[in-house]
Amino acid sequence: MAKVCAISGRKQQAGRNTRHAHSGQWAHRAPKTCRVFGVNLQTVSVPIPGGGTKKIKIAARMLTSRKFKAILAGQAPLPKGV
């Protein structure tokens, strides 16, 4: 299963890690390495309309969003593909 939020679609992003700047000439500039910024995914049980629950993975910042609260209250449907 891909590491993607079921509600917002957030996924990992590529970036660069910059170490502290070294003083001096251009030859001593701050080293940079490639890295990946992951998403803080949490597994949550969500009630489904027919009864029972379904486990979905969502980003931690979506736990307090209006969209997710509407899904928990049954006012909004589950996203497609979940």
Image (cartoon, rainbow, N blue to C red):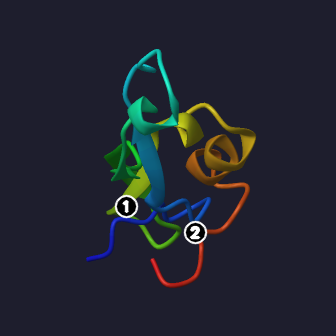
The C terminus sits in image quarter: bottom left
Q: Is residue 67 left or right of residue 72?
A: right
Number of residues whose C-alpha sits closer than 10 Å to that of mark 1, classed few (under 14), some (14–19) or many (20 or more): some
Identity of the amino acid at label 2? Leu
In percent of width and height, residue 78 lies at: 58, 69
Q: Where is mark 2, residue-wise?
A: 78
> In the image, what residue occupies the spot 33% across and 45% down?
42
Residue 61 vertical placement versus 2 (above, below): above
Q: Is residue 36 left or right of residue 9?
A: left
Q: Could you say whether the residue bearing mark 2 is in a helix, strand or loop? A: loop
> In the image, what residue occupies the spot 42% across and 38% down?
27
Residue 6 vertical placement versus 67 (above, below): below
Identity of the amino acid at label 1? Ile
Task: Please report whichever mark, 1 or 2, sits nearer to the chain's N-terminal start.
Answer: 1
Residue 4 in which image quadrant? bottom left
Q: Which mark is residue 56?
A: 1
In percent of width and height, residue 13 lies at: 48, 59
Q: Is residue 29 left or right of residue 55?
A: right
Comparing 31 with 69, the one in front is: 31
Q: What is the residue that sits farthest to the top in this orientation?
A: 23
Contact check, label 1 and label 2, Cβ < 8 Å: yes
The N terminus sits in image quarter: bottom left
Number of residues whose C-alpha sits closer than 10 Å to that of mark 2, classed few (under 14), some (14–19) or many (20 or more): many
In percent of width and height, residue 12 lies at: 43, 59
How many numbered discs, if any? 2
| Front tag of 1 and 2 | 1
In percent of width and height, residue 79 lies at: 59, 72
Comparing 43 with 19, the one in front is: 19
Residue 75 in which image quadrant? bottom right
